[in-house]
Amino acid sequence: MSRYDAYIFDVQGTLMDFYTPVFDALANFFGSEENSVPIGDLVRAWRRDYFSRVASLDQSAAHWSPVQDAYTAGLDAVSKALNVPIDPAHHAELAQAWKRLTPWPDVPEGLQKIRQDAVAATLSNTDMSTMVQLSRTHQLEWDAVLTAEVFGAFKPEPFVYERTCRYLGVEPGQAAMVASHPYDLRAARAVGLATVFVYRPYEFGCIDDAVNDAEGEFDHWVDDIRSIP
């Protein structure tokens, strides 16, 4: 029996591996030059740029700037910063890799287990179209698919978590936010949700860059969503 009535999942990094498909897309693009290009550093810098870029966007439900555009613009910035020349004509094509994420091995079975007696929903900062595409591609079943685009605001805005609970018909104390990113869990906790930290040691391709809850800050720690209480 699940401890909570609803489980609300972050997607990029928590449920899906973004590093491998983005790395592979860049490696394929550079071809024989791959060994001379710091591709891992480029992927990590691109992800960091995404966080800073979306934080500065003035979004609303009526006037939504696609997250995919932020990835496209970000590649220009990080490639210049790392002195890795990429023709701007290829930026949008390479940014499509962020729509081809792959689930971590534990995810399909873990979601099925949770949905046996609780509600499972996404709450991602990605675009709705991307979330729908990823769910269909990997045959992931949800009780609700929610993203920042629905709310016209990105996590960690407090009302995003509050309204998600309202849409799911649960009080915050009956729900748990599941994520591998402390900022996400802290924001959810601030409005009353329980927190499940998911340790993904290779989220950024290198265990040295992994984020962990070493201090036991959150309610639960798992490294496999099949172990979520």
Image (cartoon, rainbow, N blue to C red):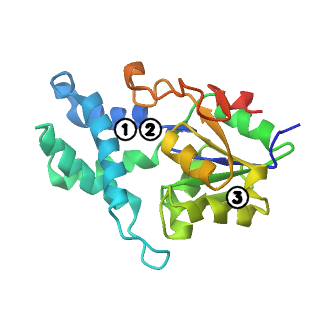
| Viewer-nearest residue: 9 or 194 | 194
- Please identify the quarter of the rendering in which residue 171 is found: bottom right
> In the rendered view of the protein, which quadrant contains the C terminus?
top right
- Cβ–Cβ below 8 Å for labels 3 and 1? no
User: Left or right: where does residue 35 sit relative to residue 26?
Assistant: left
Horizontal and vertical percent position of residue 174: 79, 51
Rounded to the nearest whole Å, what is the CA distance between mark 3 and mark 1?
A: 27 Å
Q: 94 or 211: which is nearer to us? A: 211
Q: Which residue is tagged 1?
A: 22
Q: Residues within 10 Å of mark 1 (few under 14, many from 20)?
A: many
- Asked whether residue 92 is in view, the answer is no
Q: CA distance from mark 2 to mark 1?
A: 6 Å
Foreground tag (3 vs 1): 3
Q: Are marks 2 and 1 in contact (CB under 8 Å)?
A: yes
Residue placed at 65% from the left, 66% from the top?
163
Does residue 171 sit above or below 203 in this rendering?
A: below
Amino acid beneath label 3: Ala
How far across and how far down the image is residue 75, in percent?
A: 24, 48
Mark count: 3
Tag 3: Cα neighbours inside 10 Å, few (<14), some, or many (≥20)?
A: some
- Considering the numbered disc 2 on the image, is that residue within a helix, a strand or a loop? loop
Counting residues from the start of the chain, the first of labels 3 and 1 encountered is: 1
Q: Is residue 41 above or below residue 121?
A: above
Looking at numbered disc 2 in the image, what kind of residue is underneath it?
Answer: Phe
Report the residue marked by disc 2: 18
The tag earlier along the polypeptide, 3 or 2, is 2
Q: Residues within 10 Å of mark 2 (few under 14, many from 20)?
A: many
Q: Residue at x 50, y 56 (%)?
A: 155
Q: Position of residue 214 (x, y in %)?
A: 53, 23
Q: Which mark is residue 144?
A: 3
**Considering depth in this image, is 12 or 153 the residue closer to the camera?**
153
Q: Secondary structure at mark 1?
A: helix
